Image: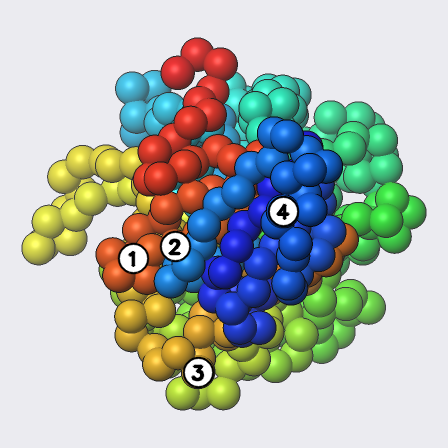
Amino acid sequence: MFTIIKNGNIYSPKYIGQNSILIQGQTILKIGDIDIEKFKDIDPNLNIIDAEDNILIPGIIDPHIHLLGGGGEAGYMTRTPEVNLSELIECGITSVIGLIGTDGISRTLSSLYAKAKALEAEGISTYMYTGNYHLPVTTITDSIKEDLMLIDKVIGTGEIAINDFRSSIPNTDELAKIIAETTVGGMLSGKAGVTHFHLGTGKHNLNQIHNLLANYDVKANKIYITHFDKSLDLLKEGITLSNQGVYIDLTADTNTVDCVDYYLQNNGDIAQLTISSDGHGSLPKFDHNNQLVGYDVAKCYTLTEQLFNLLKHYHQDKWDDIIALFTSNVANALTLHHKGHIHENYDADILIIDKNSNKIKNVLAKGKEMLSDYKVIRKGMYE
């Protein structure tokens, strides 16, 4: 079956003008002028989507999401729920990287793998990290390397907690060994082999990461650190690390525009920056006296909200870079081949955005229409 998206303004994420896209199965076959009448003769079930006056961008890749839910840090009733398919589709998220945070006991890697496989069967692309906050690293097989080589979904290790009282208080030697084993596992399996770090707000900031880069044989581009939005001091250090080749991630929140502004104004490497949702993670809420008053759940839609806020904030000549934060930069950090771009021979993960309302009009994931005319048309098995 063929699908033609006609006359959309395409950001690949680089702007390539108004064009049409021909899709067969899950793959983009052609971008350019397309003879629609010819394909009507070839395929009586031809799906034609009119994207005139709309914006086309690659599907969003969320590099940090708690597919099984998270939380539990204030007792069993504070465990957050699992992610379902329709909320991802509503947000334009067509690829996810699942992980486990603090609770690596009741939320197991086997369950995360099963959840990733289920979401893949329902229509999106899914990947995962082995491990969780704590050391020694929990794996499905006997080692990080074996997980990377033998478990199809595993692309790296994470989220390893540093600078956080909830971590295992790892020493730098331990971190270096995890990065080395993950790197080799990635080399052997042809995967990213990145180590994904959760960054807390402890007293040592990023001292261990600076030490790793200065004194150990680790590659900067195999280090991917999240939660730099927590403080200006952390973001300053993130800028320094980005210029050494480390990948830096912001958690989408109300301060995202300010963080990106600061990052760019202080010469952070834009190609090393990504934005994630932390979807279904636990969010503690504090009052004006900084006293804990309750918990909320991180929403996946915050990621899309901040994409639109950034597009509104920046002039169109910056949109290529902004869209890349949610798409191609993530694909590059995680070596997700055929993802993150609207490009011939890539997967047809495409969002059609109504530029007047800043709403997602259509979502295609691997060539299948999941949201049409602002409504989800493919839901999860039990939704």
- Residue 103 seen in the current view: no
User: Closer to us: mark 2 or mark 4?
Assistant: 4
Q: Are marks 2 and 4 in contact (CB under 8 Å)?
A: no
Q: CA distance from mark 2 to mark 3?
A: 18 Å
Q: Mark 4 = which residue?
A: 37
Q: Which image quarter is the C terminus in?
A: top left
Q: Residues within 10 Å of mark 4 (few under 14, many from 20)?
A: few
**Percent x, y of residue 52:** 42, 59
Label of residue 119 in the image: none
Of the numbered discs 2 and 3, the one sitting upstream in the chain is 3
The amino acid beneath tag 3 is Asp
Of the numbered discs 4 and 1, the one sitting upstream in the chain is 4
Q: CA distance from mark 2 to mark 4?
A: 26 Å
Label of residue 353 in the image: 2
Furthest residue to the left? 288
Q: CA distance from mark 4 to mark 1?
A: 31 Å
Q: Nearer the viewer, residue 108 or 2?
A: 2
The amino acid beneath tag 4 is Glu
Q: Are marks 3 and 1 in contact (CB under 8 Å)?
A: no
Of the numbered discs 3 and 1, the one sitting upstream in the chain is 3
Residue at image coords 71%, 77%: 214
**Percent x, y of residue 65:** 48, 41
